[in-house]
Image (cartoon, rainbow, N blue to C red):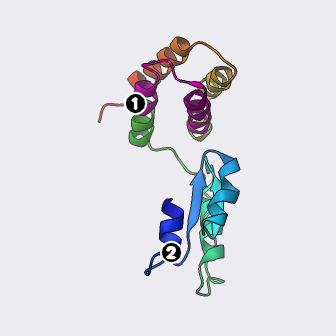
Amino acid sequence: ALVAALARAAGRPQAIIAMSGDPSRGQAALACGADGFLAKPVLRIEDLTRAVLHHLPQPTAHLRPVTAPLAYDPLALGDDLTVVSELLEDEPDAELRSYLAGFLAGIARQSGDGVLLGAAEDFARGAETGLLARLVADRRAALPPF
C-alpha cells in the first residue's frame, strides 16, 4: 500500500526501492510501482547504493558505490527484538510464526548471529515458542543499555 501510494503521489520520489525480509514480495512491490526491490537483510552498503544509483534519473556515472559492509545498529536490533518478544508472548498462529521466523532470520544474518539464525529456522519448522522467547530475551539482555 505504501509503495502504491508513493508511486501515485503528485510529488513521486525519483526512485522507489522497496525492501522486505520476504523475497517473494518483490514482484508485488514492482507491480505496485516500485522501481526496484532489495531483499533484506542487505549485508553490503554497495548493494544498497548500487540499487539506488541505478534507479535515479539524473546522470550518476561519476558516483561509485561504497563497498564497506553494513553494520547493524544495536538500538534498532533492541527495538526489533522487543517487538519479537512481545509477539511471542501469546502462541503465534501459523502466519505470524512464518513472519517471525523470517524476520528473526534476517536479524540474525545482519548481526552475524548463527545461533539465532538456527533458532529462527527451527522455529519455522515448529520448534517450541518458549525456547525462542528465551533466546530473544537473552539477546536483548546482552545489548548495551541506551
- Which quadrant of the figure contains the C terminus? top left
Residue 95 lies, in percent from the top left, at 59, 31
Q: Is residue 34 above or below residue 128?
A: below
Write the residue at 58% across / 41% down: 110
Q: Is residue 139 above or below residue 107?
A: above
Does the magenta stretch mainly form a helix, a strand or a loop? helix
Q: Which residues are magenta?
A: 83-108
Q: Is residue 99 magenta?
A: yes
Write the residue at 52% across / 23% down: 92
Pair 2/1: label in front: 2
Task: Write down the quadrant of residue 32 in the picture.
Answer: bottom right
Q: CA distance from mark 2 to mark 1?
A: 34 Å
Of residue 111 and residue 97, the one placed in the foreground of this image is 97
Of residue 112 and residue 39, the one placed in the foreground of this image is 39
Residue 58 lies, in percent from the top left, at 58, 87
Looking at the rendered structure, the number of numbered marks drawn on it comes to 2
- Determine contact: label 2, label 1, CB under 8 Å: no
Q: Is residue 92 magenta?
A: yes
Identify the amino acid type marked 2: Arg
Which residue is under mark 1? Answer: 82
Task: Write down the quadrant of residue 37 in the picture.
Answer: bottom right
Which residue is under mark 2? Answer: 8
| Left/right of residue 8 with respect to residue 53 in the rendered view | left
As drawn, the label of residue 65 is none
* SS at circle 2: helix
Of residue 101 and residue 32, the one placed in the foreground of this image is 32
